[in-house]
Amino acid sequence: MNYLKHLFGTVLFISVVGISYGCNLKAKEPIKTPLIAESITEKPTKQYVKIALLLDTSNSMDGLINQAKAQLWDIVNEFTHAKCGNDSRPLLQIALYEYGNDNLSSREGYIRQVIGFSNDLDEISEKLFSLTTNGGEEYCGQVIQTSLKQLDWGKNADDLKMIFIAGNEPFTQGKLNYKDAAYNAKEKDVIVNTIFCGNYEQGISTQWKSGATLTGGDYMAIDHNRQVVHIATPYDDVIIRLNSKLNNTYVSYGSAGYAKKELQAAQDLNAAELEEVVVVKRAVSKSSRLYKNSQWDLVDAVEDDEGILSKLAEEDLPPALKGKSESEIKSYVDGKKAEREKIQKEIQELNAKREAYIAEHQKEEKGELENALLSAIKTQASKKNYTWD
């Protein structure tokens, strides 16, 4: 499963590196006119990293999908610490497409948008676990073009936008020429990165490398069926126990609150079915700034807008808060927030020890994809003023 870490870690970091504007947001110069005494400064908008994952779900790709399910949390955990040159923290949005599956519509090119750009990590995880494989035609150019047309990539030149496509058939299949799709990607400032599931040279000969280089992206080849042995640490069980306590700090509200809280628990179970270490990685993600659930959790919602408490109807409240005054609800939410922050801090501290333990006990594999990627990505990222803390 480590390789999809590479896949997703790659996705993430390459997205961070690929756009010419990077993180160098600067306020515009004050505009002065004879009629206006005060200067006007345009405030920069929030910065995003937008990642579209295009996954081949034909029969041969079961290994790819299984690793994708696990490695979502590696992306989040790496990206949590990314910082722009102006000390801001870019936000992460992920979209997911599947292609090359006979169960999909032939009229749509055997392509389906599984989820559009979203920062709802539980929902993204749920959609990954919903994927199944079945043989089909794999049209790389068309799925790239479809994602370019359907997704809201935005017009902010400072956003980092990228596509990551993985598969194992020739990149040239389908009526739509992949070069045209690559040209359209460049027009939108979107970098296409390709992952060939197979032999490196075969990926080159079947134009996967060309598909990446046309947009300044990276080409990689991986063994998608490779089994990786994860290193258990003395901190794993404690983190898993803390994860259960962390769930108890979430206060669902609104019509979707209960279902969303159930989804949170379901994704914990999905992670556990893969491997214990995936539960640990997910717990670490849930203790990070990127795991926000303002749309259904009252603690996150109040942090974003304290005024929400005065807007909630009685039927929107969970049983524990029905009949309570606004001040009583606020006190309850504040208590849950303090409890959550304490647990999140404990998880982060334990994870730092866990990572040190893994680094000490993990044998280096010469030529391992991760080593090559991190070296290249860190070098490029430094040119865009990204740092990690």
Image (cartoon, rainbow, N blue to C red):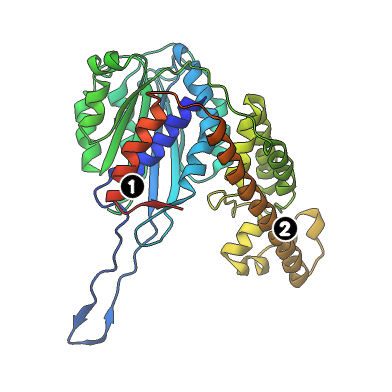
Q: Where is residue 338 in the image (x, y as percent from the top left)?
A: 70, 61
Look at the picture and state if 317 lies above or below 357.
Answer: below
Q: Residue 86 versus residue 68: which sits nearer the camera?
A: 86
Residue at the disc numbered 2? 339
Mark 1–mark 2 Cα distance, whole angstroms, equals 35 Å
Residue at the disc numbered 1? 160
Per the image, label 2 sits on a secondary structure element best described as helix
| Whether residue 276 is visible | yes
Q: Say which mark, if any, is on residue 39.
A: none
Other residues around mark 2 within 10 Å, as few (<14) / some (14–19) / many (≥20): some
Q: Position of residue 296 (x, y in %)?
A: 64, 51
Q: Residue 291 versus residue 350: which sits nearer the camera?
A: 350
Residue occupying the point 78% across, 69% down:
328
| Residue 191: quadrant of the picture | top left
For discs 1 and 2, the disc positioned in front in the rendered view: 2
Q: Where is residue 3 in the image (x, y as percent from the top left)?
A: 46, 25
- Closer to the chain start, of discs 1 and 2, is 1
Look at the picture and state if 26 lies above or below 207.
Answer: below
Q: How many marks?
A: 2
Residue occupying the point 76% across, 54% down:
318
Residue occupying the point 34% across, 37% down:
375
Amino acid type at mark 1:
Leu
